[in-house]
Image: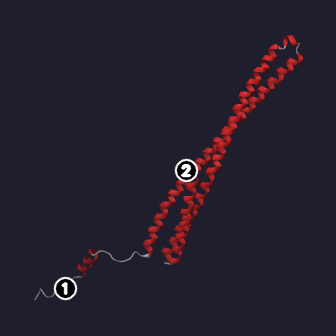
Amino acid sequence: MSESLHTHAPHEEAIHEAAEPATHKPTLGQWVAIFTALLATLGAVVGYQGTHLMNEVLLAKNEAVLEKAKATDQWNYYQAISTKEHLMQLAVDLTPAKQAAPYQKKILKYKAQKKSVQAEAQHLEQLSSAANSRSERLNRPHNDMAIAMIFLQIAISLASITALTGRIWLFGMAILSALSGVGLWVMALSLA
């Protein structure tokens, strides 16, 4: 008789249910949690890349300023040589022709110096201009990354509100905002 009658205690049923594989669909809350975790990770990557890019912008701008300062120093040196040349020319004009030879020799020396100093100053100005252009070129993708980060943060906020309210349309808006952020991020990467 005991073989035909078998009763389960409540704890045996709980153990039996826990051992069975779960066949239920993920809830909206689970989707929101996964989505938010992915966006937070992506946001960290975008933030890091944006910071790195801003450092590159600042380094290029600093390089432009330094090269410009070096060029200014060269132009000042050019002016000093030019002043010496004019003083030697004045000495030639005021000195009898027989005694003017040493001054004329110095004039030739100063003319040669001016050419090399001028070439160096122009080269430094070109380096400054190139570094400035690089800084401006890198600043555009940095701005796009910053806007991408804003869209990702909006998406995380909308997903959080979705978890609180259970409104699926908010989750759709979060997805659209995230896609906008990812699109801007990819565009910024292609420009960098």
Q: Residue at x 77, y 27 (%)?
A: 80
Q: Tag 1 or tag 2, which sits nearer the N-term?
A: 1
Say whether residue 68 is visible.
no
- The secondary element bearing badge 1 is classed as loop
What is the spatial separation of the Cα atoms under label 2 and label 1, in whole angstroms? 67 Å
**Which label lies toward us, 2 or 1?**
2
Q: Amino acid at mark 2?
A: His
Dots 2 and 1: beta carbons under 8 Å?
no
* Colour logic: secondary structure
Q: Residue at x 17, y 85 (%)?
A: 6
Number of numbered callouts drawn: 2
| Location of mark 1 (residue) | 7
Horizontal side, residue 16 vs residue 54: left or right = left
The vertical placement of 68 against 176, above or below, is above
The vertical placement of 118 against 151, above or below, is above
Quadrant (top left/top right/bottom left/bottom right) for the N terminus: bottom left
Q: Residue at x 62, y 44 (%)?
A: 60
Q: Residue at x 63, y 54 (%)?
A: 140
The vertical placement of 93 against 16, above or below, is above
- The secondary element bearing badge 2 is classed as helix
Nearer to me, 123 or 68? 123
| Location of mark 2 (residue) | 52
Which residue sits furthest top? 98
Say whether residue 120 is visible.
yes
Q: Which mark is residue 59?
A: none
Find residue 136 and report its horizontal and vertical position in percent.
65, 50
Horizontal side, residue 85 vs residue 10: left or right = right
Which residue sits furthest left? 1
Local packing at callout 1 (Cα closer than 10 Å; few below 14, some 14-19, many 20+) is few
Find residue 78 and report its horizontal and vertical position in percent.
75, 29
Find residue 29 and report its horizontal and vertical position in percent.
44, 74
Q: Amino acid at mark 1?
A: Thr
